[in-house]
Image: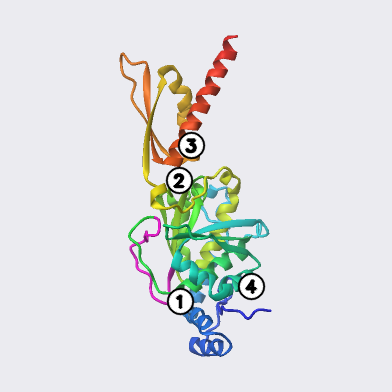
Amino acid sequence: MTESLFDTNFTSEENQPKPTTNTNSQTNSNATNSSSNQSNIVNGHHDNSNNSSSNTNSNQRNNSKTSEQDSNGYDQSTSLPSINDNANVDALINYRVLVSAKEAGCLIGQNGQVIDSIRGETNTKAGISKLTPGTHERILTVSGKLDDAAKALSYFAQALIGSTIETYNYFPLKQLSSTPCVQNETTILRLLVPNSQMGTLIGSKGARIQQIQHNFGVSMIASKSFLPGSNERLVELQGTVNDLYDAFRVISRCLIEDFSSSVGTTYYIPRSPQLTRKSTATISFPNDMVGALIGKNGSRIQGVRKVSGAMIGISEATDGKDERVFTITGTQQAVEKAKGLLYHNLEREEQRRAEFNE
């Protein structure tokens, strides 16, 4: 069996405080049995034994409160699932995480040592996409049971804690939080979440995302805009390894509640700047067709926006004009997809009316 690169003992697994340990002696012991790269990862772990007891008690209180809310019939979107809720514990979940090219190197490790160790220790599948020429981004995917996937993500966070912190001044690698990471203590993971699942994660009026931050001591910020050419949004989590682990366990339980809504997601693919430049197109449709293209309460046009990832504006009706203009903005791919969907909806409506008049 491959020797473990990680020395983290997550406190919440048994709901018992983590015993106080001597970080230096652990590091020395691991350094004796590991290469220098392995030692760097172990050194990246920051012992949180001094506050683990209070964190555990806080989590227990929160879990008790959540269960009470559920039994009283409160809206699930405002209360967090219990961290010990095993209803879906064997369900499989798939995470997509945005990383920089340099971060990807840390997560893979020399000869794949880091990612191989995480796969083996957490019983998950994990991989990192190839680097697209002209980009700085790669996608880490992690698949497994809820708590296994949470543990794997936390181990990847631990590997990043031991690396040099990089800063970027452009979306989506630019840090959303204004709080800088503390060297060798905190780090950031950027989850890619389908927009269709953001509601179950954020909660009614932001209740769930606020509780996750408060209960587990992490910073959690969701981007307002989609990633280019997709309908995925960025959810940035910042914190210590132990806090991130607990947060991921709850996040997994939130997302699994609404996993079916992710069907049809247009996933983000890093592309060179030449392929992600904004494009604009205009299409005119007859006034009597506009209502059908928009749909009841805007449902149909919202569906086109969601699937294509493009922004669509519609001109106001003007006296003397029998057409209205749809302005489509986004990447070239998103614009073309939106146009195709609009024309498809137009064709269906024309066919429906023809059949109705027969």
Element type at marker 1? loop
Bin the neighbour count of mark 4 within 10 Å (Cα to Cα): few under 14, some 14-19, many 20 and up.
some
Q: CA distance from mark 3 to mark 4?
A: 42 Å
Q: CA distance from mark 3 to mark 1?
A: 42 Å
- Sequence-first disc among 3 and 2: 2
Q: Nearer the viewer, mark 4 or mark 2?
A: 2
Q: Nearer the viewer, residue 196 or 113?
A: 113
Element type at marker 4? helix
Residue ID at (43%, 57%): 210
* Residue 147 pos. (x, y %): 61, 64
Residue placed under numbered mark 3 in the picture: 337
- Sequence-first disc among 3 and 1: 1
- Sequence-first disc among 4 and 2: 4
Give the magenta part as a residue range: 172-187
Question: Left or right: 67 with respect to 328?
Answer: right
Question: Left or right: 122 with respect to 98?
Answer: right
Residue ID at (48%, 39%): 308
Residue placed under numbered mark 1 in the picture: 162
* Residue 66 pos. (x, y %): 55, 57
- Sequence-first disc among 1 and 4: 4
Q: Main secondary structure of the magenta part?
A: loop
Residue placed under numbered mark 2 in the picture: 229
Residue placed under numbered mark 4 in the picture: 121
Q: Amino acid at mark 1?
A: Gly
- Inspect the magenta stretch and tell me whether residue 177 lies in it: yes
